[in-house]
Amino acid sequence: MKERPPVEDWSTDFDHMDPRWAADPFPIWDELRAKCPIAHTKRYGGAYLPTRLADVRDIAYDTESFSSRRVVIRENPPNVPIPSPPITSDAPHHRPARMLLLPAFTPQAIAPMQPVTRRIACELLDKLAGRTECDAALEYTQHIPVRVIANMLGIPEDEGDRFRRWIHIFLEDTIRDDKDSAARLVETVNEMTEYFRPFAEERRKNPGNDLISFLTKATMNGEPLTERHFYGTLQLLLIAGIDTTWSAIGSSLWHLARTPADRRRLVAEPQLIPTAVEEFLRAYAPVTMARLIAKDTVVNGCPMKAGEQVLLSFPAANRDPAAFPDADKVIIDRQENRHAAFGLGVHRCIGSNLARMEICVALEEWLKRFPEFTLKDEKAVQWSQGPVRGPRRLPLLLAGAAA
């Protein structure tokens, strides 16, 4: 992989894969809001970065000027589109692709998954019993969404290593300049299709209550899903349903490990956890999406060129002081909290009900077992790079474990 020059000026040469961005992006966004609220870079074929909520919202809702055909900014994108409907779909295809998935992610549909999620969390915590330290990312947070979405899809729960490898290839490994990155991405898409194929063939013969069976019976515009749509949707559900949620759980634990007052309050007032989760989602929103500029346009006085991309930083928007009082403070009982962690506009995350439930359950069960814990070494925490930010390594010291 080619070494990339470090960023000298974030307003004219930003790089979301710069290690400083991954480690601590918040002062970068603060600087840009004050100096240049819509930054630009020539890297990645040209990209813009709005840092204020109002600008991010305007772009997210303007589906004529901004296309979702490319939702990840890559140095070397493949020549063929990677289908992941509805997230990569534009009108008129987006709405029917989204509507067919909505019934599977309503609160009523997600409710039966809560005891499954709790069972998974407790099994993982049982393995930590008696320990004085652990890596919460490797041993807890990364496993919960993997096993939950596998359960929903009706595929083996123990394939976590395989799924994590795919996620790394999709969201980190193939973003920066590498002559083989585009080919590796396409190979991974094909590998995922072939992994799902026998499950799909079996469900067509013997349907069950899982998401693969749901998609085998789904129709769009009165027709069964094409193979490209069918497998692209399965790939989306797997990729989008894992890394985003484990990153949110990990960031929440990271905050609680560093903030004893918040941790002890949630132990004493577990009914506050859902409200605290909304604040963790605002303050540490994991997902940054991209849009392809479909035609020359202007956003808040900034001209944007067709063919370049926009990095829709929902995390930066959530830290905008013009939209949130004390935006840089984490206030776990914040009442007014219309954050953008799940996106904005027609592409708002379908799986938000599932994600919220998983985060709440993961924190509830963790705090029951480990009401006292701290970071083992702040410098040992490793954050992911790319469109999803969360702890990949989270070494904790455990104390006060509940019996």
Image (spheres, grey):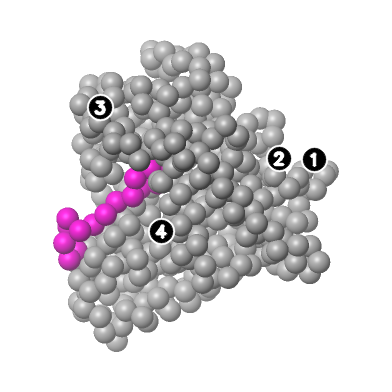
Residue 174, horizontal then vertical, whole percent? 44, 42
Residue at 69%, 64% (x, y): give it. 199
Mark 2 and mark 4 lie on one chain; the one further toward the N terminus is 2
Kindly indicate whether the residue at mark 1 contacts the one at mark 2 (C-beta within 8 angstroms): yes
Question: Disc 4 residue type?
Answer: Trp
Q: Which residue is mark 1?
A: 221
Q: Nearer the viewer, mark 3 or mark 2?
A: 3
Q: Which residues are magenta?
A: 375-389
Residue drawn at the location 43% of the way across and 67% of the way down: 143
298 left or right, relative to 35: right
The residue singled out by tag 4 in the image is 246
Q: Going 51% across and 51% down the picture, which residue do you hit?
A: 240
Are there few (<14), some (14-19), or many (20+) residues within 10 Å of tag 3? some
Label 2: how many Cα within 10 Å (few below 14, some 14–19, many 20+): some
Residue at label 2?
96
**Secondary element type, mark 2:** helix
**Spatial distance from mark 2 to mark 4, Cα to Cα?**
29 Å
Q: Which mark is residue 10?
A: 3
